[in-house]
Every structure is written in structure tokens, then in C-alpha cells.
Amino acid sequence: MRPEQLTLVLRPRSGMEAVDLGIRLVQAHARSIFATSFAVILPPALLIIAIVGYALDMPSLAGTLIWWLKPLYDRALLHGLSHAVFGEQPGVRQTWRALPGLIRRSALLPALLWRRLDPLRSTRLPVDQLEGLKGRVARDRRRIVANRVGGAGFGLMFCCANFEYVLLFGVIALIENLLPERVSILEHIWPAMTGSEVIDPQQALWVALAFNLGYACMVALIEPFYVAGGFALYLKRRTDLEAWDVELLFRRLASEGAKRLAMLALLVVCGATLLPAPAAEASEPRREAAIRQTPKAIADVLKAPEFGKSRKHQQLQFRAEPETKTQDAPGWLKRWLEFWRGAGRWMAEGLRIAGWIGIAIVAAVLLRLLLRQLGVMRARRTPPPPPAEVAGLDIRPESLPDDVAEAAHQLLASGRHREALGLLYRGALSRLAHQSQIPFARGDTEGDCLMRVTRAGSGARAYFAQLTRSWQGVAYAHAAPAADEGERLCAGWREAFGGGQ
């Protein structure tokens, strides 16, 4: 490290001021840093999504691997930031060329294993990558560097981790608002995240893979700020421990003093050549005489009354108890307490904000109840009764036989496939409208009905989706279902809606 070549102003800073310095560093070199971030993060993420997410059909594991490889991305980002503080801006190609050496020298394997969940990972990373220390020396150095900045480092990690998901869900909400009214991507994202039953597994897989790619983009946007904040905390600790600011001040003063001293020497030489030499012989006798008279003058002064009196003064005072030396706490305990003291301040602030939000929600609920009691706000109207027809089909319960599944089975046995599937479809719509209270509209199509059933979260949505596809094939494509398919639909109707009407 060459502190005299840094483009930053080194001075004593608090932890949060150092984090702000790191954010300003990213802003000043945004083009090169974000280019490096996307170039390093997106290729491995796309490879993981293609192999693990798509080929192995494990999108959740793919997202976990993208998150787990953050220490690898941090090495490349710190390489660019460590050059940026000296006024250099390495390109994407230079970073890729330097990446193998960074992996070998910066202890990547421990960072991916037992140090992966370290909340101060970005603060300790420069010790491994820039100082190149190993073994016990590196452990001691990481401990010293992370001391007294635990609260700021924990707060930096907490904010960056939450901002990734805030941005990701913000983009999803924006896309959801821009889509048409009856089209929604949340119907596929939520089942893919919870592992519940979905309508189209292949479509849900692609939505989950797109979700992983969006998360990788959010990591590429937020991770530079996390690494830069940790690097700034590292510079703060180096400034505190090694007094870089004082050293740079002394070097500046020494440089300016050397220039002034050279100028003064030049003036002295010029003056010595122009002025006549002083007569030293004339002043020498007077100096010798003054030195000989000094002891006599001192003795005369001591004879004065101010120096010749002695006086005793007595005063009562409390006797001081001898101080007992208390044994100091061990260093590791002090550092642990310091870390949790800083983290506790962040947690207390978060709980305070959460408390005020909870109070506001309770107040809003009580105000709503009060306005409803006073008649200012009307209660939600009861839903209208189900329509008699949906998509041109009569769904009134009295228009259906007592045992829909058995009646449909008899129609299938007589070769009347369209009437059998139509009866099953009408019976399913009737049950969902009158018993499950799904608000079908008179002009809904088969796709609209399927969308309403899916949004309502009905337990029969998987069977209804299969029945809808079979009914559309018979009604519009005139394709008769196979014999075993008709039997499965009748048996599935009993399981989903019961045997009776």
C-alpha cells in the first residue's frame, strides 16, 4: 500500500462515514466498476441457471449457488476498487486476466466454506487479497482490522442484503402493474417459490429461472456497494492503526520544509558574500565579564526576603485508599462486546421503526372500525349471486343430475363424449360458483374461468385445469378423448367435488 499515492482524503472517520466514502467511490468510478460487476457475475450465473436450473430442473438450488458464490465476485470487485483509489481504472479484460491469480492468493476456499456467513466479509477481504498474509498472522490481522467497526460492517451487510430483494420485488411489482388485468406472473412465481401445485410446471420453471436471473442482476447492482463499503472500513482501520493521515502530513511538511530550507540557504550564501564580516573581537571581552559576574548576581537575588523565609502549613485531608488493580477483561471478550454493541444499536433502531409502523397499523385499523361503526364507511357489499350461465353453459344446480360423475360415465359408455365432458365441466363450474363462492361472470371464457379458479387458490384447480383442456379439445377441436382419460376425469370429479350434485 502506498498511502501517498491515494486519491482519497485520509482523516479520522467514524464507521458510517467510512461506508459513505465507499459509496462515493463507487459513484466516482461507476462505469468501470459496474461493467466489471456485470461481466464477472452474469456469466457464472447464466451457466448455473442453464446447468443446475434448467438441465437438472432445480431452480431453487441454482439461486442458492448464485448467492453462495458472492465471495468469488467480491475478489474481482475489490481488484477494481483497489486500483480506483490510486486513479487507475482496470478494464473488464484486465480483471478477467487477473482473476485466476486473485483466486489463488486470496484464500477463496475458506471464504466459500467456514467463513461464508461472516457478516464482516468485505471488511476482512483486503487482508487476504491486498496484504497476502497467511496462517496465524492473517487471522490476527483480520481480527485487528475488524475491531471497532463491527456495528458499521453488520449494518452495511444488513442493508445491502435487503436492498437486493427490495429491488427485485420492486421490478416484479412494476411488471405486474404493466401487464393486462387478467394476466399475472405472481400466479407462477408464488407456487414455484412455495413448492405447491402449479398449472403448467414447464411455464413455472421458466418463471423461476427468470427470477434467478433477475436476482443475479440485483447482486451485480448492489454487491459493488457492499465491497466498497467494506474496503473503506479497511482503509479507516489502517488509518487509525498506522496514522496514515499524520504520516502524509509530515511528508508534506518535510517536502515544503526542504524547499524553504534550500531557499534560506541560498539567501544566506548570497548575504555572506555581500556583507562585511562582524568584528567578533570587540564583543568577546563583554561576554566573558558577564559570565564572571553571574554567580554574584544569583547570590544577591537569593538574599531577598521573598527567598529567605520558611513557613509551615498544616491542612487536614482525606487519606487516599490504595488503588487495587483490577484484572482487565480478555481482548476477545472486549471485541465481542464491541461488535454486539454496534449491532445492537442497529437492531434497536430497526425495532423502534418497526414499533412505530405497528402503532400506525393498529391506529389505522381502529380508525377504520370506528368509521364503520359511525356509518361513515360502509362495509363491503355481499357478493352477487352466481350467474345462471357461464360461457353459454347452464350452471344452475337444478339443471344438473343428482350424480354428475355417474351420469357422465353413462354418456361416455354410449359414445357421447361431448355431452359427457360438457356435463362434467358444467358440474364443476356449478360447484365452484355455489359452494366455493368463486365470482364467475356471465361472459367469462374457459380461460377466464381457469384464471379465477387459480387466483382463488381452490384445491380443485389442478383437476379443473385438466378438465378445461379436455373440454376445449372436444368442443373446439372435435377430438374425442381416450377411454381411459374419460374414466380418469369421472373419478377425478368425484375426488374433487364428491359423488352427489
Image (spheres, grey):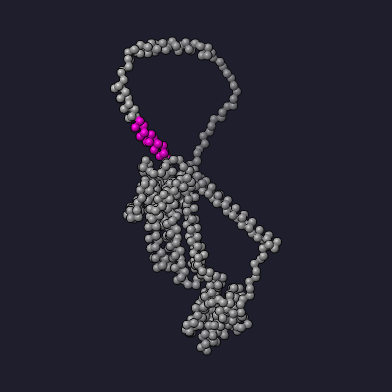
Q: Is residue 476 visible in the rendered structure shown here?
A: yes
Residue furthest to the right in view is 374
Secondary structure mostly seen in the magenta stretch: helix
Q: Residue at x 50, y 65 (%)?
A: 178
Give coordinates of residue 421: x percent, y percent. 53, 82
Viewer-nearest residue: 459 or 445: 445
| Residue 395 higher or lower than 80, as above or below | below
Viewer-nearest residue: 346 or 184: 184
Q: Residue at x 32, y 16 (%)?
A: 278
Quadrant of the image occupied by residue 435: bottom right
Residue furthest to the left in view is 273
Give coordinates of residue 167: x percent, y percent. 48, 58
Magenta run includes residue 329: no
Give coordinates of residue 297: x percent, y percent. 44, 11
Q: Is residue 195 visible in the rendered structure shown here?
A: no
Quadrant of the frame with the N terminus:
top left
Q: Residue at x 56, y 83 (%)?
A: 423
Viewer-nearest residue: 268 or 208: 268
Left/right placement of residue 133 relative to residue 169 reads left
Tag count:
0
Magenta run includes residue 258: yes
Residue furthest to the bottom in view is 414
Q: Which residues are magenta?
A: 240-260
Quadrant of the image occupied by residue 437: bottom right
| Residue 240 higher or lower than 439, as above or below | above
Residue furthest to the front in view is 274
Left/right placement of residue 273 relative to residue 389 reads left
Q: Residue at x 59, y 73 (%)?
A: 439
Give coordinates of residue 395: x percent, y percent. 59, 80
Quadrant of the frame with the C terminus:
bottom right
